[in-house]
Image (cartoon, helix red, strand yellow):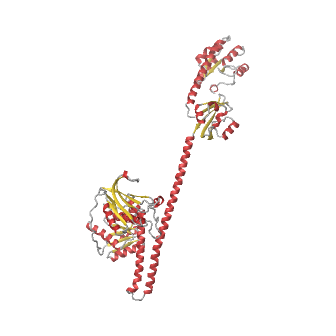
Amino acid sequence: MTLDDGGHHVVEAAEGAQALDLARRIHPDLVLADVVMPGIDGYEFVQRLRADTATAGIPVVLYTANYRPEEAAPLASAYGANQIISKSADPEQLLIAVEQALHASPLPPHSPAPSADHLRTVNAKLVEKVLALDESEARFGALADVSPVGIVTGDNELSATYVNPRLADITGLTAEDLLGPGWMCCLPAGERARLRRDGVPRAQTALHGDVTLADHRRRWLHTTIRPITDDNQDHTGFVATIDDVTALIEAEQRRHADEREREAAERRRIAERFESLARLSGAVAHDFNNILNIILSFSEFIQDELRDAVGAPLDAARAAPMLDDLGNIHRAGKRAAHLAHQLLTFGGREIVQPVVINPNAVVDEVRAMIDSSIGRQITVSVELDPDAGNVVVDSNQLSQVLLNLAVNARDAMPHGGHLALSTRHLRTAEVSRGLPPGEYVHIAVRDDGEGMPPDVVDRAIEPFFTTRPKGHGTGLGLATAYGIMRQASGDLLIESAPGEGTTINLYLPATDEAAPAPVAPASVTADAGRTVLVADDEDGVREVAARILTRAGYHVLRAANGQEALDLTRTHAGPIDVVLSDVVMPHMNGPELAAALREDHPGLPVLYMSGYADPLMSEQGIVDGGVTVVGKPFTTEELLSAVAGTLLSIDRS
């Protein structure tokens, strides 16, 4: 393209003899010839051109990639070449050389050049090329010897002429075994057959798969085959690399297996959770259906009695059966309330009022209650560490836990035995559970009863799981105890074995705070005429609260949700002294109502009534100390005491 661009008309020849024939036939203005050509080289071409009188005067420029112009120039000139130029020269240099040769004076007739000079030059170049080739082969051998992958080179028949040591390591075969077609053991059987049929691939090809080698090892090999071509792009052989990726494949397989195992474990865990929830919902439905049956049936009895009593005097004899039925309804309601509280406690969402207490004092109080109820056939001992420390927990709940555990221990010793309660101070390192670092108080409840097998221990804290006969317990005792411990940032650990008794270990974080001195409860009375705003989305509960407060002399405003309550505070003409709000309501819940009231009516007290106060709780299930919550279901005394206490604290401030 350089000569065409320079305005010259170019005729091409592929080798020396063809060029010589063209020169004799068309007499070109100039010949540009390679030094190295098939058949005859550039020197012989110039010599023959000059020997023919018809072509002797044609200028000749030689160009070369194998010789340096300065070393080839004397020989080129001796043969009659006008100029010699390197193939790597700038195109402008080539055009200049052509122009100079075209305008140069004709060369004088040349006698044949001494063949010895020609041979010495060619021989020197051949020696140089051989040395360079040896150096290149040595460099390739050094690289191949330390290569982390196997290397094969071979001919067009896919017969290996060289394999490096790494391929012998990969296959466990000798280099001799791998030469010829032996290296193809690295290919999967199907790929071997295809290569034998099709020959060396026309382009670089990657093959991978698992193969079983001669020593019966199964390996994953990744093979890349690339054809080798000459200057004319003809294929002269191939080179292949073989990488043993078994470790990577096996690691990936292990990862997938681990993922499948984790997924299976997660499915099992979900299935177990659903099974546990199914047991829980079934047990809750069973107990509540029993309670509802009592409430509904006895309420029907009362309705029948009242219809029969219409128009007749209601004396003591006629009222007695109705009062008994009402008593059954009341007791059923208390059972339902207790069951609901147990469920909330297990879930860590029961409303609690933790205070700093001395656990030794609680154990002493429980000991006194146990002595009178556990039975004479069981001896009770107490070992208290005076340095056990204080804890922050709801004292009533801790008492409930210890009483439940004592009852469980009694039932595990039907023929008598020994029950031991103890306390001690521990550091985290002495605790066998994954508790946060710190100081703990350990309360242990031990019995020498029947003990439990491992499968029972694993399920002991599940709600409604029990080994007792039907009708002898709900199966919520240990579940409740566990919930109380977790809500107090502690833990519960069971140690038991058949015939070796049971130890229930309670761990509670210790505190350096001192237990407050006991304070006698202040008497609170209602101030007649004070206004209470009651907000609850449950009509029945709202009516109950309003009726209790009205009977106590309060003036009551009613709202069905938080937004309605907020609107009432903005439109009511008179003062509102206190707001009694449910926690969970549609449109605006209790805490959101309180926040809005702080903006509109700073200082207006808000107390809550709730059976589930989750929006008020921290992650540990603790309600802020400045918040008053009346737990549902509440008694008349509990509600009036909370309202009067809130008003009294506001009046004092």
Q: Position of residue 649 (x, y in %)?
A: 28, 67
Residue 265 vs residue 358, the one in the foreground: 358
**Front residue of this view, candidates 574 and 224:** 224
In this image, 533 relative to 464: left or right? Answer: left
Q: Is residue 641 above or below residue 182?
A: below
| Residue 46 in picture, x, y percent from top left | 67, 16
User: In the drawing, does residue 434 fall left or right of residue 113?
Assistant: left
Write the residue at 34% across / 76% down: 550
The N terminus lies in which quarter of the figure?
A: top right
Q: Position of residue 613 (x, y in %)?
A: 39, 64
Q: How many marks?
A: 0
Residue 298 position by quadrant: bottom left
Could you say where residue 615 lies in the image, as x and y percent from the top left?
Answer: 40, 62
Residue 544 can be seen, yes or no: yes
Q: Nearer the viewer, residue 12 or 453?
A: 453
Q: Quadrant location of the C terminus?
A: bottom left
Quadrant of the rendered structure where residue 361 is? bottom left
Picture residue at 43% right of the left edge, 87% below the top: 310
Q: From where the camera sits, is residue 104 visible?
A: no
